[in-house]
Image (tube, rainbow, N blue to C red):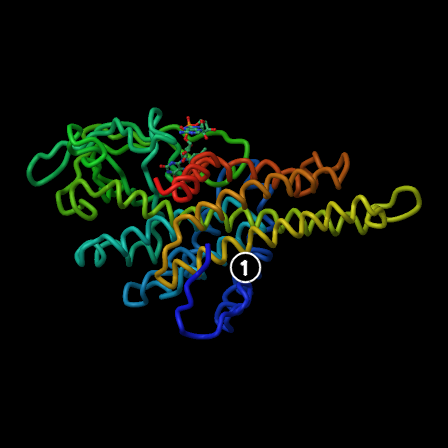
Amino acid sequence: MPVPDEGAAAPRPLTALTEEEKLFQATVRKFAREEIRPHVREMDEAGVFRKDLLEQLFAMGLMAIEIPEEYGGQGGTFFQAILAVEELSAVEPSAGVIADVQNTICNNAILRWADAAQKARYLPRLAENTVASYALSEAGAGSDAFALAARAEDRGDHFALNGRKLWISNAAEAGLFLVFANANPAAGYKGITAFLVEREFPGLQVGKKEDKLGVRASSTCELILDNCRVPRENVLGKIGHGYRIAMESLNEGRIAIGAQMVGLARAALEHATAYAKERKQFGQAIAGFQAVQFDLAKMATEVEAARLLVYNAARLRDAGMPFVIEAAMAKYYASEIAERVASKAVEIHGGVGVTKDYPVEKLYRDAKIGRIYEGTSNIQLLTIAKKLLGK
Ligand SMILES: Cc1cc2nc3c(=O)[nH]c(=O)nc-3n(C[C@H](O)[C@H](O)[C@H](O)COP(=O)(O)OP(=O)(O)OC[C@H]3O[C@@H](n4cnc5c(N)ncnc54)[C@H](O)[C@@H]3O)c2cc1C
């Protein structure tokens, strides 16, 4: 989509970073490589993200990138959150999804929709040590995300929430849940309401944790709401505005999933390139074969194209310009190429590529989820097509 000339500064290359962004990127990259990388295999096998690493993510401000400094956050930009997700995901895509859900979905929903008292109560906690989860999906409400069965019954000073949420990322560690339930089923999706639910609220229980193919170190759990008592002051935004809150949050979160997939694909390409230079067959490095060179060249082109889509969507969002279609394109394309690039990286490794001794095996498994969560590829295509067709 052409971007109107805002008449401000001269256009810059999309991948050109400011000095602050470069420093930020280098800091996250160093942290990911030095602190997270040694534990990637162990966390994948255990299906658990180490508590000490989570604490370090908080200590570095990576769980509160856009939260203003007055609340203990970094006062950074959405683009910085995108850079962080990319860098974390280049080492451990599970760390990428933890940062995605916290920063680009939950923190941002609270920054945009919470009242002053809610901001004062929750933002400092989210900046210090509280993990947040986003609880929209249910067994019967996946792509049809607003077909919620969860109900919120108005009881005056509080709401009673009942239902079961499924697939809730970070739920094992979370202290705060952004829960969507219908407070007025007769009004259909216009009854959907968002609630800030603390883990300790009576009637909330974190259920079964999924044993997954990829992003195994990021917890994905069921959430059971059994007459969960949520004070009235914990309604986020207005009653019946949950649909809008959910959509706006997901539109931003999708850009971060694009960044997660760019980081993952970049890592797969780097591993494949290094291996191709090292592995010898027929008396030479396999990187000497033109077929392998062309594979690497195609992979590099796809990673770059995906990064441009992701960075552009993020820059549009920071500029306050429309970005929904660009976010859908970024998420769609980045997740498609991540799977393809990771698959090629496995092939370039030959037999060792399917063993756990080489990181591409895990990246290939981790890539699959990109086309599913925060809206499947088909749902992104629907969003793009609707805009194209003016629906
Ligand atoms: C690891 C993981 C983490 C997750 N984290 C969260 C989270 O933190 N919070 C949360 O709320 N949810 C989360 N989810 C849920 C996720 O967003 C959903 O799984 C996703 O939206 C797809 O829904 P579904 O699984 O019900 O698939 P379905 O909606 O049943 O889709 C099945 C297939 O049908 C296709 N399909 C469905 N409708 C259409 C249509 N209209 N046109 C064309 N094709 C269609 C889909 O593209 C897909 O291929 C997570 C899921 C996973 C697996």
SS label for mark 1 = helix
Q: Residue furthest left?
A: 156
Q: Where residue 106 appears, x then y in whole percent?
A: 33, 49
For ligand 1, the image quadrant comes to top left
Using the rendered image of the protein, determine whether residue 56 is visible from the camera's viewpoint.
Answer: no
Residue 366 lies left or right of residue 280; in this view the side is left
Residue at the spot x=48%, y=46% of the render?
329
Quadrant in which the C terminus appears: top left
Pinpoint residue 219: horizontal percent, then vertical percent: 44, 38
Question: Looking at the picture, how far across and down is residue 379, in whole percent?
Answer: 43, 36
Horizontal side of 45 relative to 8 (left or right) equals right
Question: Is residue 85 depicted above or below 190 in this figure?
Answer: below
Residue flagged by tag 1: what amino acid is it?
Phe
Return the residue at label 1. Answer: 31
Residue 193's place in the image compared with 312, above or below, is above
Neighbor class of circle 1 (other Cα within 10 Å; few <14, some 14-19, many 20+) is some
* Camera-side residue of 382 and 99: 382
* Residue behind label 1 places its C-beta within 8 angstroms of ligand 1: no
Q: Residue at x 73, y 48 (%)?
A: 296
Camera-side residue of 214 and 321: 321
Is residue 287 something one can see in this rendering?
yes
The picture places residue 120, in percent across and down from the top left corner, at 21, 59
